[in-house]
Structures are given as structure tokens and as C-alpha cells.
Amino acid sequence: MPNSPAEPARRIKVQRRGPLLVEGPVEVELEDGSTVRSDRFRVALCTCRRSRRFPWCDTSHRDRTQSRRTMDTD
């Protein structure tokens, strides 16, 4: 579904160790062909696949990062 020229481009913010932040509303097509939608003004899309709410980020990536830091300082 192409965007019309009058529609502004969606902005996606890429973060090294975090989710993709997408200006919404958005519709995401999953691998199985199903579609999920969010009407929020900004959504966080999970890139690590640890989220229990995939494709939405639930910050599960933070737990593992902090565990590594703790192990490194011991």
C-alpha cells in the first residue's frame, strides 16, 4: 500500500541496543501474515525478540544487558 505524495513520511529512530521507535499509528505485518495495529503516536518495535508482547517492545532487552554488567563487575 503506497503512501500518497501528500502523506508525510514515517520517521523511524534506530537505536543500537533497543527497539525501533516508529511514529504512529502503525500497522505491522507478522511472519505468519497476520496484522497488528497500534494507534499510539509512537511505538517501540522489538528487534531482539525477547519481548513477551512481540512485535511491541516490553523492554525485556534491558534485563539481559544489566545482568551482563553485573557479571562483568564481579
Image: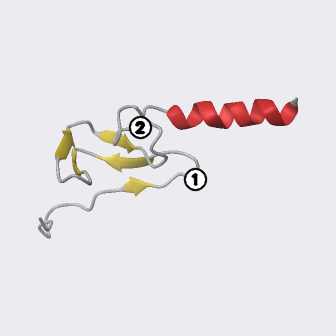
Question: Residue at position x 34%, y 43% from top?
Answer: 55
Q: Earlier in the sequence, mark 1 or mark 2?
A: 1
Label 2 near label 1: C-beta < 8 Å?
no
Instruction: Locate residue 36: give its quadrant.
Output: top left
Q: How many marks?
A: 2
Residue 59: give its label. none
* Residue type at tag 1: Arg
Report the front residue among 35 and 7. Answer: 35
Q: Quarter of the image holding residue 71?
A: top right
Specify the label residue 57 is tagged with: 2
Left or right of 4 on screen, residue 61: right
Task: Tell me which residue sits at (20%, 37%) in the image.
Answer: 39
In this view, the residue in front, 65 or 7, is 65
Residue 72 position, x and y percent, is: 83, 37
Question: In the figure, is residue 9 to the left or right of 15?
Answer: left
- Three-letter code for the amino acid on which mark 2 is drawn: Cys
Q: Which residue is mark 1?
A: 16
